[in-house]
């Protein structure tokens, strides 16, 4: 009986991995049911805009055009619901558990005084696993955020971004271009804490072989700043996302997390954070860890 069991296990492995000869290229883009919010599809679902460490009022600004340098190292993992991602016409032999991981680096620059220009360059190595089929890919892009600070508490700007994902999986290859109006507000410090919020209304333009319909995406985020010590701030945050239309597989979800900022009142400060995604039918589990640093000049 043990010998028969071993033979059955081997035959099952053979059927899944060898006999059918499934390769990443077999996952055609037309097997995907709509656009899923996530790293590999050209825009991040976690709260990137709440990551960047803020410039403390204790740090005087210089007259230099180059105002800040931002570096972010992060790891993210997403487990995807294959029953929603794949279309009903997808061959049954291709439908399997999906996991996506990225190892990323984001470079950022702050230019000018007021108005300002924030530049971000995300670069990530991604890994896709569908059952026994896996492949590595690349995610790269650029984000430009010219913004104007009305006063020390309120600012607004227009965010223009483009991100591209590429691998041997056609189903995961897609670019995303977006243009959004964003406004930022932050309260003054009182009783050892204050709050900050960000509202974004944007038009997103996905592009691959079948998904080229644009959609609106509304994002509202709020964060609390607990100043536990002059050199330590805890910053929990939550963001609500909503999209009208049928382009996204999920029209509503939330992002949440906590950031720990070290040396917030120093020219160089550091941030350690964890973030996740909730209320999303397509992304069953999504988690990210990151370490950031920012130098103000």
Image: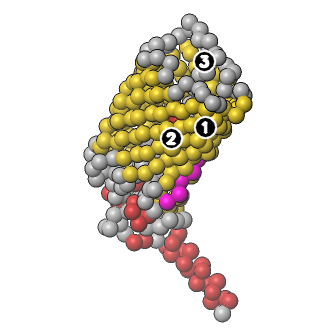
Residue 152 is one of the magenta-drawn residues: no
Q: Are there few (<14), some (14-19), or many (20+) residues within 10 Å of tag 1?
A: many
The answer to which of marks 1 and 3 sits earlier in the sequence is: 3
User: Percent from the top left, x then y, of residue 264?
Assistant: 66, 26
Q: Are there few (<14), some (14-19), or many (20+) residues within 10 Å of tag 3?
A: few
The residue lying toward the viewer, choosing from 227 and 287, is: 227
Label 1 with label 2: CB-CB less than 8 Å: no
Query: Magenta stretch: dominant SS?
Result: strand
The N terminus sits in image quarter: bottom right
Q: Secondary structure at mark 1?
A: strand
Q: Residue at image x 72%, y 28%?
A: 231
Query: Which image quadrant for residue 214?
Result: top left
The residue lying toward the viewer, choosing from 56 and 138, is: 56
CA–CA distance in space, label 1 to label 2: 12 Å
CA–CA distance in space, label 1 to label 3: 17 Å
User: Percent from the top left, x then y, of residue 256?
Assistant: 53, 46
Q: Residue at image x 39%, y 24%?
A: 157
Q: Is residue 18 above or below residue 85?
A: below
Q: Secondary structure at mark 3?
A: loop
Q: In this view of the protein, can residue 271 be seen by the observer?
A: no
The residue lying toward the viewer, choosing from 48 and 173, is: 48
Q: Residue at image x 55%, y 50%?
A: 276
The residue lying toward the viewer, choosing from 288 and 27, is: 288
User: Percent from the top left, x then y, of residue 186?
Assistant: 50, 27
Q: Residue at image x 67%, y 22%?
A: 265
The answer to which of marks 2 and 3 sits earlier in the sequence is: 2
Q: Which residues are magenta?
A: 284-288
The answer to which of marks 1 and 2 sits earlier in the sequence is: 2
Report the mark closest to the observer, 1 or 2. Answer: 1
Tag 1 residue: 235
Tag 3 residue: 57
Tag 2 residue: 47
């Amino acid at each position: 009986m043990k010998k028969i069991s071993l033979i059955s296990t081997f035959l099952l492995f053979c059927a899944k991995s060898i006999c059918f000869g499934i390769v990443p290229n077999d996952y055609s883009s037309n097997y995907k049911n709509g656009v899923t919010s996530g790293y590999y599809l050209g825009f991040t679902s976690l709260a990137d805009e709440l990551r960047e460490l803020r410039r403390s009022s204790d740090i005087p600004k210089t007259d230099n055009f180059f105002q800040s340098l931002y570096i972010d190292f992060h790891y993210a993992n997403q487990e995807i619901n294959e029953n929603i991602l794949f279309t009903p016409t997808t061959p049954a032999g291709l439908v399997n558990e999906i996991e996506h991981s990225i190892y990323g680096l984001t470079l950022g620059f702050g230019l000018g005084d007021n108005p300002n220009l924030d530049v971000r360059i995300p670069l990530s190595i991604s890994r896709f696993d569908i059952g026994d089929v896996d492949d590595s890919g690349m995610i790269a892009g650029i984000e430009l955020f010219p913004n104007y600070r009305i006063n020390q508490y309120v600012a607004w700007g227009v965010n223009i971004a483009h991100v591209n994902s590429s691998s041997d999986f056609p189903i995961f290859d897609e670019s995303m271009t977006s243009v959004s109006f964003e406004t930022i507000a932050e309260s003054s410090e009182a009783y050892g804490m204050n709050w900050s919020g960000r509202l974004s209304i944007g038009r997103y333009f996905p592009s691959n072989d079948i998904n080229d319909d644009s959609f609106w995406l509304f994002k509202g985020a709020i964060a609390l700043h607990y100043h536990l010590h002059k050199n330590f701030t805890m910053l929990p945050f939550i963001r609500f996302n909503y999209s009208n239309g049928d382009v996204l597989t999920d029209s509503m979800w939330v992002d949440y997390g906590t950031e720990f900022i070290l040396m917030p009142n120093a020219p160089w400060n550091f941030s350690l954070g964890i973030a996740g995604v909730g209320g999303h039918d397509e992304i069953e589990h999504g988690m990210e860890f990151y370490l950031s640093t920012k130098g103000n000049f």
